[in-house]
Image (tube, grey):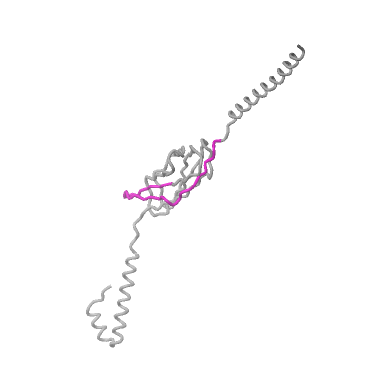
Amino acid sequence: MQWPKFLLRTMLKILPKTSRKLFLGVQIIICILLSMQILSANPQQPQPYLLLEMIYPSELDVGIEGKLQAVLRNNGNETAMNITVSFDAPPNVFNITLGPEIFPEELSHSHNMSVFFKITALETGTFNVEPNVTYFDRKGQQYEVSGEHSFNIKVNPAPITPSEYSGIIILMIIFCVIGVAYVAMRKKLEHYFKSR
């Protein structure tokens, strides 16, 4: 804020010397405060800001399908567009595919959505999975959410299926029948040779 020159001259003539310094100091402080207020009044550029929460199984069995849920919330002040979620994991360990629902193309501010993925483990061990989210604003500016929400999944061996159990049981029955037949034949053969 600038004072007209004639007003400044008039005030400086009227005020005594000590008051002049005080008056100039007050004017400087007012100018600083006004400039700070003008700077803070400038609106922040609108942009989307996505938060991610992952819901996942702590354990999986090899070959058994599990489910991952990515919960996205837009805490920004603009719509997030062209949202993609991908996963970084050791190669040839997991097969992760999008669930049956259609992936939404945009997410308005203050809204949230859940996206489901199917996950199948291919080998045993404990593995780290890191989700990555990429999205854009209306001007085409790209944003990412990564490196903050990694999680571990323990993969157990595949459970024995009933068909495998039935094979084991059939083999045991065959061995029992052979054993009983051998014992019975042995007694008959011993009796036969003793009678001769």
Q: Residue furthest left?
A: 6
Query: Which quarter of the image is occupied by the N terminus?
Result: bottom left
Residue 167: x and y, percent?
60, 26
Q: Quadrant of the C terminus?
A: top right
For image coordinates 61% across by 28% down, the residue present is 168
Apparent side of residue 26 relative to residue 61 in the rendered image (left or right): left
Relative horizontal placement of residue 48, taking residue 62 as reference (left or right): left
Residue projecting furthest to the top: 196
Query: Residue 27's image quarter?
Result: bottom left
Residue 134 covered by magenta stretch: yes
**Residue at image location 65% in from the left, 24% down from the top:** 175
**In the foreground, 43 or 183:** 183
Residue 148: x and y in percent read: 44, 52
Q: Position of residue 60 (x, y in %)?
A: 53, 40
Q: Is residue 194 magenta?
A: no
Considering every residue shown, the one lying at the far right of the view is 195
